[in-house]
Amino acid sequence: MVAGLLMAAGAVAALLQSVGSTTAPAAAQLVVTLIIAVFVTTVLRIARAVPDIRRESAATARAVTNVQAVKPNEDTLVARRLVLFREAAEAGNDCEAVLSARSALDESELANKHHIDHALIWALPVFGFIGTALTMAAMVSSFSDALDSQGDPSVLISALKQHVLPELASAFGVTLIALFLSVLAFGAMALVERAERAGVVAADEVFLIYIARLPAKQAAPAMHGLTQELAQSRGRTEELVKGLDALRTAVERLSAVESRPQRYTLVREQ
């Protein structure tokens, strides 16, 4: 709707002229209008994440001050981690491993959250190339109509000045607008994704510091899983050492047998 109003008001033609176009063909204006519509849609979709980022930042700031101030029923990163931490501690599980798994899930969710936005950003330069192709196709059609059957050089030069060169400027102007808007959209997308990942890291850091400050008795459940892994690793190492000792003993016995002098008996046939 906004793009249609801009086109009706002549803003699209003015935009094309601002990037060096001497004319504003209908095909170029239509594609630029579509590019602006996609750009506005992408920016609005990206801007929807800003309130969530602010809400997560506020919740993390409260957790840094006092983790008990976090409400478990909130749909925030720190609230989800607090619920998991309490459940893991009560069950005697490895809290650090549970929090690490929660962080991996959040990272995966963030990676899939903006796939439509990335597709729209990718489509912006594609629409620019499409607009360039359409404008150049219209240029070729106009140029062929301007030529007469006699091939007069003056007519050819006039057609080049009137139909080819201005249309070329318009064609590349469409691509320039699309590339510029795609860079702006990509920059906004990068800033939002960086802020979201920073929120995940900040939430993880809050509970890692909380685990590190726990007394030994309370921190024991968090270290239970690590202790079990170390015990299993030590048991496997001992079994490996025993196997190597048995192999060495067998090799020594075999070497001793081979080093003994052998007795050979010559038997003469009768």
Image (spheres, rainbow, N blue to C red):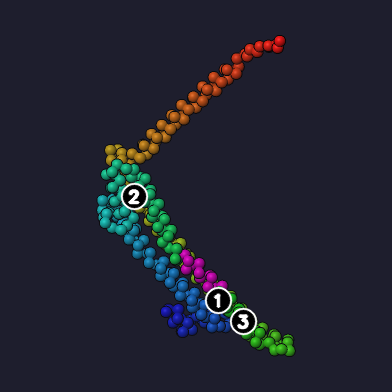
Above or below residue 108? Residue 161 is below
In the rendered picture of this protein, how many numbered marks are placed on residues? 3
User: What is the distance, in whole Å, between disc 1 and disc 3 at their CAs?
Assistant: 12 Å
Q: Nearer the viewer, residue 227 or 238?
A: 238
Query: Does residue 258 sit above or below 122 in this rendering?
Result: above
> Is residue 121 one of those drawn in magenta?
yes
Q: Look at discs 3 and 2 and give the one toward the viewer.
A: 3
Distance from Cα at disc 1 to Cα at disc 2:
50 Å
**Disc 1 marks which residue?**
131
> In the rendered image, is residue 107 in sight?
yes
Q: Residue 257: percent from the left, percent from the top?
A: 57, 17
In the displayed structure, 184 sits above or below 213; it is: below
Residue at 30% across, 45% down: 88
Tell me where residue 165 appears, x and y as whole percent.
Answer: 63, 81
On the image, numbered disc 3 is attached to which residue? 139
Read off the magenta span. 118-129
Give percent across and percent down for residue 191.
44, 62
Which amino acid, mark 2? Val
The CA span between labels 3 and 2 is 62 Å
**Rendered location of residue 189, percent (x, y):** 45, 64
Q: Residue at x 34, y 55 (%)?
A: 77
The answer to whether 63 is drawn above or below residue 173 in the figure is above
- For marks 1 and 3, the one nearer the N-term is 1
Residue 55, image quadrant: bottom left
Residue annotated with mark 2: 206
Query: Does label 1 or label 2 sit earlier along the sequence?
Result: 1
Residue 176 placement, left or right of 76: right
Q: Quadrant of residue 115?
A: bottom left
Say whether disc 3 or disc 2 marks the residue closer to the N-terminus: 3
Of residues 266 and 194, the one nearer the viewer is: 266
Query: Visible in this render: residue 167?
Result: no
Q: Residue furthest front?
A: 270
